[in-house]
Image (cartoon, grey):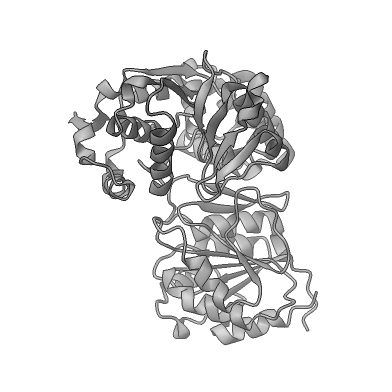
């Protein structure tokens, strides 16, 4: 077990990362001690389907949060379609219909940067496979606040633009395969 | 070098702006106020807070600043299933009566235009007075002109199709000087007011539509807004929030949710005696 006082895990990926996220959640232990906040690029006109699909394999409860919903440890939160998802200081989420960022709403940068601002060095940021640069700026914000940065090993990615964009801005602390990411997270002590 | 604020500086600035401009900046969520403020400062090349205060002495700049903090609705017929549900309610409950509908935040107009198109298609337009508020007088001018951002045309057309509209979305708009405008004949019974939720219509309303506006404000402000809506709404009337918004528990004494997915609430009819 790794003794660390992390407060949250935040994960970003494009639509193609669905299978990686699904596998990762199926491997996380049932008593996982942190909230897992996920922002995936998704079709903005399709409100349902994604969260239900992710729930199928997850041992943890998966929720598409409402605005102002409190963040609870051991639960998985998926950014809803056509909204940006932000973390607030009072440990709640806020949503926004502001302009797309990196052609995306939800934007990974928005979620990662707001989480970095709130959790600072108590945050683990993970960027998975993806076809654009969204998430790189957010990972830099996490690194600037001394949070832990992890990218999916580009060699294991269907599309490696997203993790490689992170590498262009920072040197991630860990470059791991999907199996190694879940193994690492499962070692986190309460 | 951009202006850098800590939390207490941002709170103090929000309070001062609330007092100066009469818009509830102090109730905005921390992350929203911070990022909009930074965007505005960057956009205007402002490096010191004193420069901001100086800029806002100008009435037009202050109006533009308020407009910048009112977020666009993003598209016509956003969440088409909501608009289908609203059409059903209007057809079933209000097809023979004169009614009043209030939009406490006109935003960028898409909600208003979607509503007017819906009313036109179910032949209720002449029976409905629509009341619209906005913090910015310039935004109201744009709304009155039926201005619409052209770049979202494909999304708007796709949403209209999913709404199951009976015409072509293009038939409601004309292109003037590279700008798209709603046919202003649809605006005949629309009344605009500069201000927020406290500037209620002069009549009690049957329906209030306030979707994706409260997400930028804290829970304390939600309570205030809900109380104002309660006062403005007739018993048996409807209030519509965004699909990812929720009412706090105390409100349950006065409202029941009639559509969980689309976040449509109805004020209890038994409150008629109040």
A56 or A190, which is in the foreground?
A56
At x 43%, y 45%, the residue is B82
Q: Is residue B107 left or right of residue B35?
A: left
Q: Measured along the vertical axis of the image, is residue A114 above or below residue B27?
A: below
At x 51%, y 41%, the residue is B212
At x 24%, y 26%, the residue is B183
B79 or A158, which is in the foreground?
B79
Q: Measured along the vertical axis of the image, is residue A77 above or below residue B71?
A: below
Q: Is residue A127 visible?
A: no
A56 or B70, which is in the foreground?
A56
Q: Is residue B84 left or right of residue B193?
A: left
B241 or A138, which is in the foreground?
B241
Q: Residue A100: x, y in percent?
A: 43, 51
Q: Residue A64: x, y in percent?
A: 57, 60
Q: Residue A148: x, y in percent?
A: 66, 70
Image quarter (top left, top right, bottom left or bottom right) of the N terminus of chain B: top right
Task: Determine the image quadrant of residue A76.
Answer: bottom right
Image quarter (top left, top right, bottom left or bottom right) of the C terminus of chain B: top right
Q: Name the residue furthest top.
A: B202
At x 35%, y 24%, the residue is B142
Q: Is residue A26 visible?
A: yes
Q: Residue A85: x, y in percent?
A: 56, 54
């Amino acid at each position: 077990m790794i003794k660390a006082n992390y407060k949250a895990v935040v994960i970003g990926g494009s639509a193609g990362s669905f299978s990686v996220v699904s596998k990762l959640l199926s491997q996380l232990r049932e008593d996982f001690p942190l909230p897992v906040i996920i922002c995936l690029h998704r079709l903005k006109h399709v409100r349902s389907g994604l969260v239900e699909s992710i729930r199928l394999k997850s041992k943890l409860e998966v929720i598409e949060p409402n605005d102002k919903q409190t963040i609870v440890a051991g639960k998985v939160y998926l950014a809803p379609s056509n909204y940006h998802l932000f973390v607030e200081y009072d440990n709640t989420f806020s949503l926004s219909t502001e302009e797309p960022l990196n052609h995306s709403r939800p934007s990974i940068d928005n979620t990662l940067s707001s989480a970095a601002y709130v959790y600072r060095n108590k945050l683990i940021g993970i960027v998975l496979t993806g076809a654009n640069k969204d998430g790189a700026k957010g990972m830099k914000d996490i690194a600037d606040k001394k949070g832990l940065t992890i990218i999916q090993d580009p060699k294991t990615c269907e599309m490696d633009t997203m993790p490689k964009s992170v590498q262009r801005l920072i040197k991630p602390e860990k470059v791991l395969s999907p199996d190694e990411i879940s193994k690492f997270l499962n070692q986190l002590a309460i | 070098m951009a202006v850098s604020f800590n939390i207490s500086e941002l709170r103090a600035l929000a309070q001062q702006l609330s007092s100066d401009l009469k818009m509830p900046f102090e109730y905005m969520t921390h992350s929203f106020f911070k990022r909009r403020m930074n965007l505005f400062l960057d956009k205007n090349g402002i490096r010191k807070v004193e420069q901001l205060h100086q800029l806002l002495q100008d009435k037009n700049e202050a109006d533009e600043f308020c407009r910048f903090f009112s977020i666009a609705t993003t598209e016509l017929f956003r969440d088409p299933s909501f608009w289908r549900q609203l059409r059903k309610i209007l057809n079933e409950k209000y097809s023979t009566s004169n009614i009043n509908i209030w939009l406490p935040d006109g935003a960028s107009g898409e909600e208003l235009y979607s509503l007017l198109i819906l009313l036109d298609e179910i032949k209720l337009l002449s029976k409905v007075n629509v009341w619209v508020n906005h913090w910015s007088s310039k935004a109201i001018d744009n709304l009155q002109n039926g201005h619409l951002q052209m770049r979202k045309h494909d999304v708007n057309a796709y949403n209209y199709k999913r709404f199951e509209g009976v015409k072509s979305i293009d038939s409601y708009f004309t292109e003037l000087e590279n700008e798209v405008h709603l046919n202003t004949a649809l605006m005949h019974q629309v009344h605009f007011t500069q201000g927020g939720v406290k500037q209620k219509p002069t009549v009690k309303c049957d329906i209030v539509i306030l979707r994706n506006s409260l997400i930028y404000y804290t829970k304390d402000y939600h309570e205030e807004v809900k109380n104002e809506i309660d006062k403005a709404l007739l018993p048996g009337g409807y209030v519509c929030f965004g699909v990812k918004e929720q009412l706090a528990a105390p409100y349950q004494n006065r409202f029941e949710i009639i559509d969980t997915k689309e976040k449509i609430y109805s004020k209890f009819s038994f409150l008629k005696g109040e």
